[in-house]
Amino acid sequence: MADESFPEIREAVRRLCARFPGAYWRELDRERTYPTEFVKALTEAGFLSVLIPEAYGGSGLGLRAAVAVLEEIHRAGANGAACHAQMYTMGTVLRHGSEAQKAACLPKIASGELRLQAFGVTEPDAGTDTTRIATFARREGDKYVVNGRKIWISRAEHSDLMVLLCRTSPRDEAAKPSDGMSVLLVDLREAVGRGLTIRPVRTMLNHATTEMAFEDLEVPAANLIGEEGKGFRYILDGMNAERILIAAECLGDARFFIDRASRYARERVVFGRPIGENQGVQFPLARAYVQATSASLMIDAAASLFEDGQPCGAEANMAKLVASEASWFAADMCLQTHGGFGFAEEYDIERKFRETRLYQVAPISTNLILSHVATHVLGQPKSF
Ligand SMILES: Cc1cc2nc3c(=O)[nH]c(=O)nc-3n(C[C@H](O)[C@H](O)[C@H](O)COP(=O)(O)OP(=O)(O)OC[C@H]3O[C@@H](n4cnc5c(N)ncnc54)[C@H](O)[C@@H]3O)c2cc1C
């Protein structure tokens, strides 16, 4: 089965995660603090650099290895959202950066000396319609001067660098709405307090997300990735990997819920028999397993296409959709199976329940995936 790929990586991730049990995550969740020790352990073990080519100090593995890492983290009850971006955000630099930019960044990202964990696209007034972003970078000699706002920029307070998407020419002056956007690599260590303000946003889960205000932030022109005006395409390029890896996290969550519910259904005795003896309890459990197994196959198919360099936009989107639905169904099933105890913090189920709900909204909401499949795969007319 697809979930048995990379057994050695999976086993090593399980061993690492065992050092960070539920009590560790519960305390962080209560305080909304960042899992620094966990991220450090993953970095030192090399799990966050699996996608970086060996020439730049990573292990040069394919996306399916990264899928195995994130799935196991989530299956263990941990949360990879604190650091998953360190795995794939560097892809923008790797695919579109200059040799000098790659040589300067990638080896340090691989070693953990540099954290590239922040990815700044979403804006309060643009929503999913990315072509409407208004954050503007004006070229002035050898620098850009950036003004605007971003929202939901995760891990910015725990990152050294940020990949920032901004406009470099107004939308109405571009040939296409998606033209005229550019990607800048922003050094957050230099930017904060000198034109960039970061404010944490507290949410229903422990996610280290923030909003940002740019007021005449100066960014060296040498930090432009690729060509000016082509940034939207570069960001889109990275989205397939992101969707497949987030799907892997959903799958790990689904398996966590199924493991927990299965065990509880066998052990919990009510009316003189294990609750799992009742088909009303068995069937949702079995359905959750069927959904998770299907999602696993879809993720593997999408990741294999990605590794082969084939187009995989539809498959990446579909993997994300089925996996996020499998995790949410499994979350609800697990909570229900546990009855009242599902609501007790110490079972970790209510925490994971809150965490897994995010994936139907971010990094792309379910409706937008359905719209992609309807128009790009099924040839339906575009509605927007
Ligand atoms: C915790 C968290 C972390 C995040 N981290 C990051 C990050 O690090 N970097 C980053 O750039 N962004 C990040 N995001 C933003 C995330 O990608 C967006 O929230 C997500 O893409 C949805 O966009 P929106 O919130 O603007 O919703 P909107 O675009 O305002 O949409 C609202 C609702 O309307 C629906 N909708 C909108 N248009 C249509 C349509 N045409 N047809 C049908 N339905 C439609 C959507 O599906 C959605 O359900 C994060 C968000 C959260 C909550």
Image (cartoon, grey):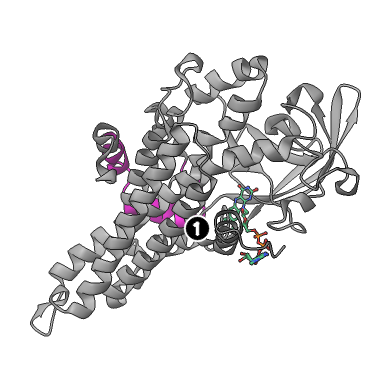
* Residue furthest out toward the bottom: 271
Our reading of the magenta stretch's main secondary structure is helix
Considering depth in this image, is 14 or 19 the residue closer to the camera?
14
Residue 18 lies in magenta, yes or no?
yes
Q: Please indicate whether residue 60 sits to the left or right of residue 278 in the image.
A: right
Residue 216 position within the rendered picture, expressed as x and y whole percent measured from the top left: 87, 38
* Residue furthest out toward the left: 272
Q: Residue at x 18, y 63 (%)?
A: 263
Residue 135 position within the rendered picture, expressed as x and y whole percent measured from the top left: 81, 46
Residue 254 position within the rendered picture, expressed as x and y whole percent measured from the top left: 34, 58
Ligand 1 appears in which quadrant? bottom right
Q: Quadrant of residue 37?
A: top left
Identity of the amino acid at label 1? Answer: Tyr
User: SS for tag 1?
Assistant: helix
365 is higher (above) or lower (below) than 227: below
Q: Please indicate whether residue 262 sits to the left or right of residue 204 in the image.
A: left
95 is higher (above) or lower (below) than 254: above
* Residue furthest out toward the front: 379
Circle 1 crowding by C-alpha within 10 Å: few under 14, some 14–19, many from 20? many
- Which residue is tagged 1? 359
For the record, the magenta segment spans 12-35
Q: Residue at x 75, y 56 (%)?
A: 126
Q: Please indicate whether residue 365 sits to the left or right of residue 332 in the image.
A: right
265 is higher (above) or lower (below) than 93: below
